[in-house]
Image: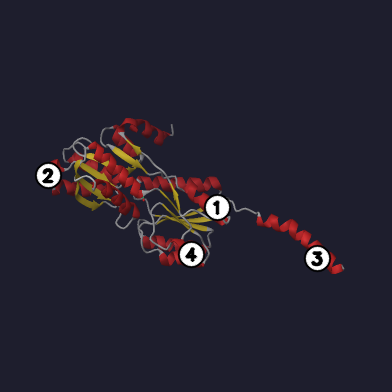
Amino acid sequence: MRFLKYSLVLLIVLALFVPAVAAQEVTAEGLTIGFAQVGSESAWRTAFSEAIKAEAEARGITLLFSDGQQRQENQIAALRSFIAQGVDAIILAPVVETGWDEVLQEAADNEIPVLVVDRNVTADESLYITRVSSDFVHEGRLAAAWLVQATAGKCKIVELQGTVGSSAALDRQTGFNEVIALFPDMEIILSQSGDFTRTLGKEVMESFLKAVDPAEICAVWAHNDDMLIGATQAIKEAGLDPAEDILTISVDAIPDIFLAMAEGDANATVELSPNMGGPAFDAIVRYLNGEELPRWIPVAGGIYFPDTAAEEYQKRTQGS
Ligand code: AHR
């Protein structure tokens, strides 16, 4: 009888407390998250770093920030250091697509969830919880679609590719080429990597302008705005007018490209939002609370032209 009584009391106590314990939700506040960033190769990248740091601070997250300086080995070392420190989660913005399996497996072995942000990885999907990013293929398609209509489907293009082996470069190229392949008079005549930097964008464009008769070049397609801005400097130094003699199309929508468009030096940019920290942190918290995540969390962007450039520049630099 006494045993029964104690069992009953125990059951009541469990019934009262177990749901309370089970319902305890993980919140962002107090989490420690390691972030392995690519580097600071472009203005977009810098804006992304600033945005994610501000977002972490606003949510009470301790963000361990590592700048990989565009080198995969630095990023792998950063991931290993985050694992050793026992962080609650890791965000990886990978410089290139391949070569991540081993270190992602190490994170999994230590039960540390990894979220991929921006560029993609080729690793097994079970090794990361989700990816927060834009659709790079779509960005390339959008860029090509604009150029097709601007040139009535007839254009000799020079291409400034992003970092070799990065999904941002590979996928933008795929999307762009898919669209121009539908038009027999659209052709890429020269293509080289400018590593997403302004300096190399200028250097590569200088070499393009020497490699062919500049009058032959109808447009420059740059995988990011920084390379495009470098290229416009080279075009001007060659005595030509960017956006007039040579049309321009690029990706990112950084403030400087709006300035260039407002000054008549660029024609169009496809937007890549730097605000990926919020959705990434939301996804991590959802995961830690046992929710199932979609494999991909998309971040949208539009395409911008000179007509709104001055206003956009103002908005993005002065917040009005
Ligand atoms: O991965 C996104 C690309 O990386 C951006 O378009 C470019 O500016 C950056 O370096």
Say which label, 4 or 3, has the lower sequence index. Answer: 3
Q: Is mark 2 within 8 Å of ligand 1?
A: no
Q: What amino acid type should be assigned to the residue bearing mark 1?
A: Arg
Which residue occupies the foreground of this view, 28 or 15? 15
Instruction: State the image coordinates of residue 42 (x, y, percent, origin top left).
Output: 34, 47
Instruction: Kindly identify which numbered label has been placed on residue 58.
Output: none
Q: Mark 2, residues whose alpha carbon is within 10 Å: few (<14), some, or many (≥20)? A: few
Evaluate if marks 1 and 3 touch, with contact meaning CB atoms under 8 Å apart: no
Give neighbour class at mark 4: few <14, some 14-19, many 20+ (Cα, 10 Å): many
Query: Between marks 4 and 1, how big is the CA–CA gap?
Result: 19 Å
Q: Are marks 1 and 2 in contact (CB under 8 Å)?
A: no
- How far, Cα to Cα, is label 1 from label 2? 56 Å
Q: In what quadrant of the picture does the N terminus appear? A: bottom right
Is disc 4's CB within 8 Å of ligand 1? Answer: no
Give the spatial CA distance, label 3 vs label 2. 91 Å
- The residue singled out by tag 4 in the image is 107
Foreground pick, 50 / 23:
23
Tell me, what colour scheme is on the image?
Answer: secondary structure
**Residue at coordinates 51% horizontally, 58% vertically from top-left?**
89
Q: Is mark 3 within 8 Å of ligand 1?
A: no
Nearer-N-terminus badge (4/1)? 4
- Whichever of callouts 1 and 3 sits on the residue coming sooner in the sequence is 3
The residue singled out by tag 2 in the image is 213
Residue receiving disc 1: 286
- Amino acid type for the residue under numbered disc 4: Ala
- Disc 4 is placed on an element classified as helix
Q: Does 64 sit above or below residue 217?
A: below
Q: Residue at x 42, y 47 (%)?
A: 48
Q: Give left or right: position of 45 versus 57.
A: left
Q: Secondary structure at mark 2?
A: loop
- Label 4 vs label 2: CA separation? 52 Å
